Image: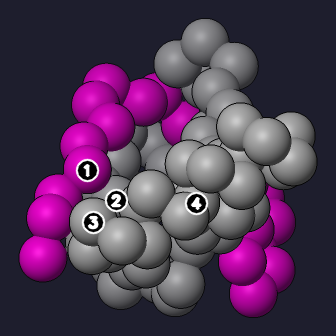
Amino acid sequence: MNKWQRRIGNWLTEHLELPSDVILELPRITTIGKIHAYIENHRGLILFSDNELRLKMEYGYLKITGKNFVLKMMLPEEILLEGTINDIQFIDH
């Protein structure tokens, strides 16, 4: 995202009270302890294994590591992951 897009997005979220995750196309990650992760606004599944989930985001990748992973739900832009989550990382392009 370039500086201009970010400024417009920030202005829209401030003045029109629109959610920043929607305007700036950012992922929304909701966790319940270390056992559930609900991820919205992803752009596709890159890798899934018993101990790693990697998703493409608008501006990079999201990497979640842990163990005993199970995909409980997978929709075009939403995923529900269950297992033991140890780490969540954002990786730039």
Which mark is first along the chain, 3 or 2? 3
Q: How far apart are marks 3 and 4 (CA)?
A: 10 Å
Residue 67: x and y in percent read: 36, 39
Question: Residue at left 71%, top 55%?
Answer: 12
Is 10 above or below relative to 78? above
The label shown at residue 62 is 2
Q: Is residue 60 left or right of residue 91?
A: right
Q: Mark 3 points at which residue?
A: 3
The residue mark sitting in front, 2 or 3, is 3
Q: How far apart are marks 2 and 4 (CA)?
A: 21 Å
Q: Name the residue under label 1.
A: 90
> Please, what is the three-letter code of the amino acid marked with disc 4?
Gly
Q: Is residue 31 left or right of residue 60?
A: right
Tell me the crowding category of disc 4: few under 14, some 14 to 19, or many 20 or more residues within 10 angstroms, Cα based.
Answer: some
> Please, what is the three-letter code of the amino acid marked with disc 2?
Leu
> Can you see residue 27?
no
Q: How far apart are marks 1 and 4 (CA)?
A: 20 Å
Looking at the rendering, which quadrant does residue 59 occupy?
A: bottom left
Which mark is first along the chain, 4 or 2? 4
Tell me the crowding category of disc 1: few under 14, some 14 to 19, or many 20 or more residues within 10 angstroms, Cα based.
Answer: some
Q: Is residue 50 magenta?
A: no
The label shown at residue 67 is none
Label 1 close to label 2 by CB (< 8 Å): yes
Tell me the crowding category of disc 2: few under 14, some 14 to 19, or many 20 or more residues within 10 angstroms, Cα based.
Answer: many
Q: Mark 4 points at which residue?
A: 9
Highlighted magenta segment, given as a residue range: 72-93
Question: Residue at left 53%, top 84%?
Answer: 43
Which mark is first along the chain, 4 or 3? 3
Is 51 above or below relative to 61? above
